Image (cartoon, grey):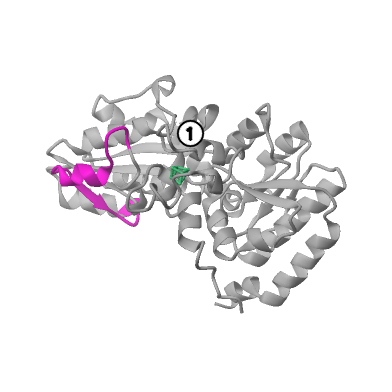
Amino acid sequence: MKHLYEYRNSEQVKRLIQAIDKVVLNPWNIMEICGGQTHSIVRYGIDEMLPDKITLLHGPGCPVCVTPITVIDKAIEIALKPYVIMTSFGDMMRVPGSQFDLLHAKAKGADVRVLYSTLDAIDLAEKNPEREVVFLAVGFETTVPLHLTAIKEAKRRKLTNFSVITSLFTVPAAIDAILAEKDCKVDGFLAAGHVCAVMGYHEYHPLAEKFRKPIVVTGFEPVDLLYGIYQCIVQLENKTGKVENAYQRIVTEAGNLKMQELMKEMLVPADQAWRGIGKIDKSGLKLADAFKDFDALEKFGASIHTQDIETITQTRCIAGDIMRGNKQVADCPFFGVKCTPEYPIGAPMVSTEGVCAAYYSYTNFKEQAWS
Ligand code: SF4
């Protein structure tokens, strides 16, 4: 735990808060686009420790939360076929579709199973040759290589009864779209450390230049987060807007070239619909033609065109506004009253990376794990 506790060290945290307090002169809004960072921020009360001049906004960094309703509906439609075993990560089970979620499909008789890894679905397909095993594969650049490794393994094992529904997103295009909005409130970004561990951070330079806003690669522990925020504030006060790396122990400019090669081989960029946000050009990834046999939507004749995908959240849910930085969770009248993990209205309440789930879990329980 050595490399965990030193990044939760209370003395270091105090020093960084003091350093931030010293440099901040103006009000600034900083957005993280990573559900893991969001949960750390709320869990450790980092948003409450910062000087009042700094507001943290929680961007669309949770792939479960931005997976469109149409994709959930298609997954349910396929799951209800009698010979299908529908699989995914646990938090996909409660994500509301237009009518109901995958757990309700299970109650209606669908064979829906929670798995910890896409690779588990390969084993399941091998053990059930008479069934079609489908994995609902969601993720940002971090998780994508895991899904791809499973597809490669399925190909190696010559499995013809395994396929995936992909809902894959890329972070730089989302930053571009948020910053391009007319009333954008975001002054600086914390780039997700784990995404950058795979992709590097070379893609962010043109964005920082285009919008003249700081983008700081940041980790997940309290010390990491505060250091990233500190670097961001220093840039903002100095009126600079460039990319910096505050997570050097993990992230390099080039990233993980092997994983990037795998992604180039198996995926092509695609326009992507983001739940609550809308369509963003080239902000997604889909399987390349050579791997189309593993595309469940093609296999079941259920393909969906991006322009037809429903990106509106349920009318009452303001998750889209929260993820674009225009509102905070506290602005939602349903939070903790009509929207709870047991009875969710929107996806961010049920995802383990969702912002509403973070505030719901930690509002009355701030992590006491300072070393
Ligand atoms: S609390 Fe529920 S309804 Fe409100 S924004 Fe979050 S998910 Fe949507």
In the image, which residues are magenta? 97-119
Residue 290 percent coordinates (x, y): 38, 31
- Between 300 and 318, the one nearer to me in the picture: 318
- Measured as percent of width and height from the top left, residue 71 is found at 35, 33
Q: Locate ligand 1 by image quadrant.
A: top left
Q: Is residue 265 visible in this depiction of the protein?
A: yes
Tell me if residue 337 is in the magenta stretch.
Answer: no
Secondary element type, mark 1: loop
Residue 249 is at least partly visible in this image: no
Total labels: the figure holds 1
Q: Amino acid at mark 1?
A: Gly
- In the image, residue 10 sits, relative to residue 154, either above or below, namely below
Q: The C terminus lies in which quarter of the figure?
A: bottom right
- The reply, left or right, for residue 251 in relation to residue 167 is right
Quadrant (top left, top right, bottom left, bottom right) of the N terminus: bottom right
Q: Nearer the viewer, residue 89 or 107?
A: 107
| Left or right, 6 with reference to 64 | right
Question: Residue 254: image x %, image y %?
Answer: 66, 48
Q: Quadrant of residue 323?
A: top right
Residue ID at (59%, 59%)? 41
In the rendering, at what x and y percent does residue 97 appear? 32, 36
Which residue does the image show at 63% across and 34% down from the upper left? 178
Residue 40 relative to residue 28: left or right: left
Q: Any magenta on residue 108?
A: yes
- Where 145 sits versus 223, above or below? above
Q: Label 1 CB, ligand 1: below 8 Å?
A: no
Query: Circle 1 sits on which residue?
Result: 276
Name the residue: 20% across, 42% down.
Answer: 105
